[in-house]
Image: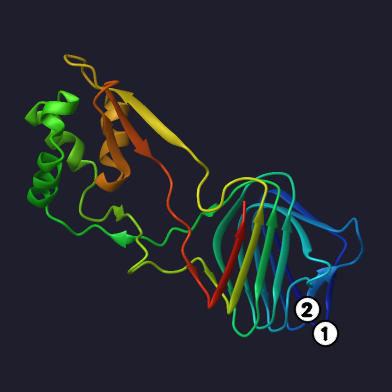
Amino acid sequence: DIALRNIDQEFRVSSISAANGTVNLTTSGNIINHDGTSLITAKELILDTASGIGSETDALNISTGKIHAQAVDDINLRQTGGDLGVDFISSETGDIMLTADGNVYDASEDEIEDSRTLEEKMEEWNEMELFEEAGWTKDQLVYAVNYRGSGIDYEKDTTTAIPSIVASKITIHSEGAVGTRLQETQIDISEGRILTEAEKKAIANVPSSRITVDEENNVLIINNNKPIVLKGDIVNIEA
């Protein structure tokens, strides 16, 4: 891991690398590229400044799996070489512009806690007709639902979720998708087939709104993605 605090007015980055760790930069001034070859590489990147990050004509070059950035002024980031997972990006008074070679998706851990009782979960699963569609026995269903417990995170939705990106104006340019990594799991639910322990756990650990049943092909599909939640007056997305 690398943690740096710059006491000067401006933080000019040439090269910072912690490919398997976290890079944490804090400063009161702008965080900008030193030149065209500048790059911050990290498994997780944390940027905190009382000014801005990058510029409209020269976005800060980064290569990270997960980004957390807070600034007072504009934030301009360019992700190179892969997907960009957004934990939280916020500008108090400025705009945010993200450019990525890959997908831009929600990597935050803020979820709505699932505080339902086991009986309430059972009722929901019954309404999905998983007994009929997935060949569950009652014991199997209880076993699966119990994996959730009372403190497992529940799905984020746009009415109550904490936004991942907050600014007056948000612009995202992505060579891939925005809001998802397009990942899903398919489970064979042919009549008479017994689900494996791993399959039951996979189903139990996601909210039912992320589960669909393809009756024609006897497949249960689990969507492993969350939508990315934005809060801005103006939002421009190109993917």
Instruction: Evaluate whether residue 138 shows in this view.
Output: yes
Observer-nearest of 192 and 7: 192
| SS category of the residue bearing label 1 | loop
User: Along the horizontal axis of the image, is 177 left or right of 153?
Assistant: right
User: Along the horizontal axis of the image, is 108 left or right of 168?
Assistant: left
User: Along the horizontal axis of the image, is 26 left or right of 122?
Assistant: right
The residue under label 2 is 30
Kindly identify the amino acid type of the residue bearing the numbered disc 1.
Answer: Gln
* Residue 177 percent across, percent down from the top left: 57, 47
Specify few, some or many for label 1: CA neighbours under 10 Å numbering under 14, 14-19, or 20 or more. Answer: few
| SS category of the residue bearing label 2 | loop
User: Along the horizontal axis of the image, is 39 left or right of 223?
Assistant: right
Observer-nearest of 138 and 146: 138
Observer-nearest of 53 and 56: 56
The residue under label 1 is 9
Instruction: Evaluate whether residue 1 shows in this view.
Output: no
Q: How far apart in space, not on screen, are marks 1 and 2 (Cα)?
A: 7 Å
Circle count: 2
Q: State which mark lies toward you, 1 or 2.
A: 2
Q: Earlier in the sequence, mark 1 or mark 2?
A: 1
* Residue 98 percent across, percent down from the top left: 67, 62
Q: Are marks 1 and 2 in contact (CB under 8 Å)?
A: yes
Residue in view at x 64 percent, y 66 percent: 171
Residue in view at x 30 percent, y 55 percent: 154
Asked if 101 appears above or below 198 in the picture, the reply is below
Asked if 35 appears above or below 75 in the picture, the reply is above
Residue in view at x 26 percent, y 32 percent: 213
* Residue 217 percent across, percent down from the top left: 30, 20
